[in-house]
Amino acid sequence: MTTRDKDSAQPRRKGRRRGAAETVSKRTPNYRQLRNPFPVMSVFSDDEAANMHETALTTLEELGMRVLLPEAVKIYAAAGARVDGDMVYIGREIVEAAVATAPKSIHCHAGGPKRDVTLELGTLAFQPGAGAPHATDLKRGRRPGSARDYREYTRLAHHFDVFQMMSPSVEPQDIAINLRHFFTTEAQLTLTDKLPFLFSRGTPQTMDNFEMLRIARGLDEEAFLNGVHAYTIINTNSPRTLDIPMAQGLIDFARNGQLSIVTPFTLMGAMAPITVAGAITLSHAECLAAITLTQLVREGAPVCYGTFTSNVDMKSGAPAFGTPTHFQASLAAGQMARLLGLPWRSAAGSASNINDVQAANENQLGLWGCLLSGATVIIHSAGWLEGGLTVSYEKLVTDVDVLNMVAELCAGNRAGADEIGFANALAHVAPSGHFFAAPQTMERYDTEFYEPVVHDYANFGTWTERGALDANSRATGVWERILAEPPGVLASPGELAALRAFVEKRTAEGGAPPES
Amino acid sequence: MTTRDKDSAQPRRKGRRRGAAETVSKRTPNYRQLRNPFPVMSVFSDDEAANMHETALTTLEELGMRVLLPEAVKIYAAAGARVDGDMVYIGREIVEAAVATAPKSIHCHAGGPKRDVTLELGTLAFQPGAGAPHATDLKRGRRPGSARDYREYTRLAHHFDVFQMMSPSVEPQDIAINLRHFFTTEAQLTLTDKLPFLFSRGTPQTMDNFEMLRIARGLDEEAFLNGVHAYTIINTNSPRTLDIPMAQGLIDFARNGQLSIVTPFTLMGAMAPITVAGAITLSHAECLAAITLTQLVREGAPVCYGTFTSNVDMKSGAPAFGTPTHFQASLAAGQMARLLGLPWRSAAGSASNINDVQAANENQLGLWGCLLSGATVIIHSAGWLEGGLTVSYEKLVTDVDVLNMVAELCAGNRAGADEIGFANALAHVAPSGHFFAAPQTMERYDTEFYEPVVHDYANFGTWTERGALDANSRATGVWERILAEPPGVLASPGELAALRAFVEKRTAEGGAPPES
């Protein structure tokens, strides 16, 4: 019997040859807990990295940090740092002791247990693009971010499992600043059960946020203090400045056992040295100063290392993202994080003004820099345009296809006897034949391949007949369909009522303006 | 003296503070000889990879290859292979002996010495997208490929240093098939001094091509036979078939000491098993059969391993590229190539119908699969749409920005004392200051960063004032400017006249139709 005979003789599974249109995928990929499968890449030698770390320690000792919050200055001083006005000179023994007590693994409790995220070297979590004053989509154009945008973006980020953590997506500029934290926190606590992001805009707002979190999650004081239920992002003001709200955030989150992700946001050639080595040495020093503060407040307080360093375009001074320099800065920061052994955050992003080919290429190049640097958390991994001035609904969707594919790669693959398939595939098909009906194919056709959100594999003729829609136009359809569903409300009626009552009471009291 | 005082006191280099518009880059990046700086990634364990290799050997021994060229069947038979009609069963000892004589490093002579390329594990070369029947651009739309397209695409590929090798870009369908090889070879030999690609469409055409190459490069028979001056691509007809022109190409190129890059082009679930392990085992077997033929013809003949394996969309049967499966197939092929120790070729590519965000994301994801698999040559790295049915002028340009950035990453970076810059940067700038005037910045501002071809860092307002052009529209301007320059003619007048005379003589003789 030739192989071709075998092919014809093979009983057809499922009664008949599968037609194209009948296929229904049974894939159930799990994107909720990922481990980074990519090999770690270094840009500098181990000696060079050690020298950068040493220089950062010298920078803190000899050049010092400017710390604008007196309470923080006192904490550093009490630990033995030399103080001169708002300048704090932190000895390396203080820094090294703090790094030693910072946790190497941080378990974060989300609204549901399947949403929990563990942050440690080797795990991988994505956040959508964050911090934008504007939002844009193809239906409504570019506009100042609004409450509607914030809620919609929260729902979109909730929809895609590949975002394991929420981010401060877009600024709801139509909400008064003394009440805005009520709005953003309530939206997250009711529209998603993922790990929420809380702004650090001063102690009064932070305390409100923590109370809302305790109410919505049904946590007593002890449960709250002993588990991570939310995180904030701390940006130093590079070079070498820690401002009042950021210092307060570090202190408040550490005291309450909640997570600070420390991220100096530096642009090489502007507020950081023009070299990768110089910029990351500065960023590292600032990060160490902030991590130190958390550990001085509460030994073992959850804190992530972080960086976001790219270059400016030296012709215009404009920020650039997804550049080779951005990529190398991520690699260098990864070397620093591994020296400390701490989980850490890096960032993708794009400088493009619309979701075009530049935006796609920049975001993905930046993403690969993060993945190869072994970053634990990757922010701005989707939807970020104009160097963070705008979040795009379409870009969120098109970037999700890339993130999903990375998540698929996290699952690895196998080459056992069934997969190699000498008997059930290779020997089954004659030369110049096809594998559509091979037993191996029949067993796997509805589970083997990733099914994209927005990528379209139709040929030119079919695609043209269907309207010749580009990926962006199709992405509009995707987010419209998601938002057309009624929003999920993920708190219980009792919790929801208590949350509403708290917000109404605090609103009547005038809320809390942000610290500046 | 505080650091701020130091900043003010610093004498300003170049007479005055550099203004944004005055910057002229002095960067001189070398993209012509690259080494892959990325860590190699495996998708299977070493044992699994060894099992795949063993299964491929068993496949050749027990299932056999269908070989349509009687001369090739005789060559296999003479080496001891068992033959049954056009079926050839190749014992593993024949394959193993052939792999042992295949060169591990191949030096390719281009038209100019700075264009030479060495192919071995660790080096890296890019080719633009290839083999398309159609061409498209935003000015003239999608059309059947023409002589004009072929010459223009050749000039564009020549323009960008990041393409170290030419590719069979687009089919000049308006040239008669018995004369087409004269046209494509003459265009490459006169419009570029990069390593040319020669089609293997039968011995008569190949002999014409070789003669043209000898004339244009001024090579005598001995110099030609003893150095690689051109390459061809050999696609097996999967599964397990080697057709007449491909077998002739392998034999002719091996006899003449020219390079064959063997690339089974397989789509998982269609002409290859649905699994990565099965598809790469099949591809590996076919590749081994072809490599074996070259070594039986001439021991030590230059030959590259290769693969191009992606999946079909099981809903429609349409080819998909830049998928997680495509990525893993590259990783698996890299494991096979490293088992053999041979230089090898992989491929990026896109299934998108236009140069949109999908096209960008697919091509770059596929590219990273190739880079992390340690591929020596990456074809379809720019400009490929519709799974290879069309080359896009704009996509060529936008993908070049990505390839250039990868080439920048090949150069690495340094973290010596000057780069860390404690004295010339970090200590020079006060807290909350800026580094624009730091000595380190002044020394490096015009050389430190990559300057993109098409990426635009202008802010939204400036970008809007300039016409709100997306990356594609700007890419149109880029290729129009390149083609507006007079084409370079890179052969000497004498060589050019001899080349013309040869083509005219052979045209008068009726040329040579392709073998099929």
Image (cartoon, coloured by chain):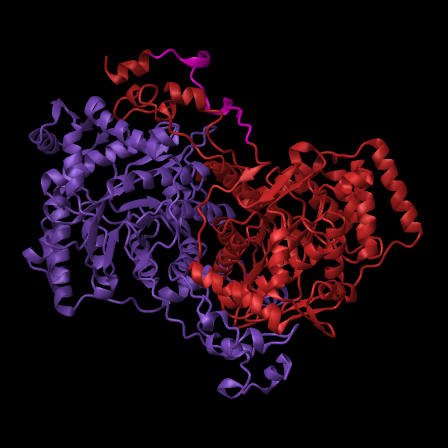
Chain colours: A purple, B red
Secondary structure mainly formed by the magenta segment:
loop
Residue B436 location, x and y as percent?
38, 23
Residues A379 and A214: in front is A379
Q: Which residues are magenta?
A: B10-29
Picture quarter containing residue A499?
A: bottom left
Residue A71 location, x and y as percent?
9, 33
Does the magenta portion include A418? Answer: no
Residues A15 and A72: in front is A15
Relative to residue A97, is residue A380 depicted above or below? below
Residue B500 location, x and y as percent?
87, 41
Residue at x-position 30% and y-position 21%:
B429
Query: Which quadrant of the figure contains the C terminus of chain B?
Result: bottom right
Residues A264 and A31: in front is A31
Picture quarter containing residue B504?
A: top right
Residue A256 location, x and y as percent?
11, 48
Relative to residue A445, is residue A59 depicted above or below? above
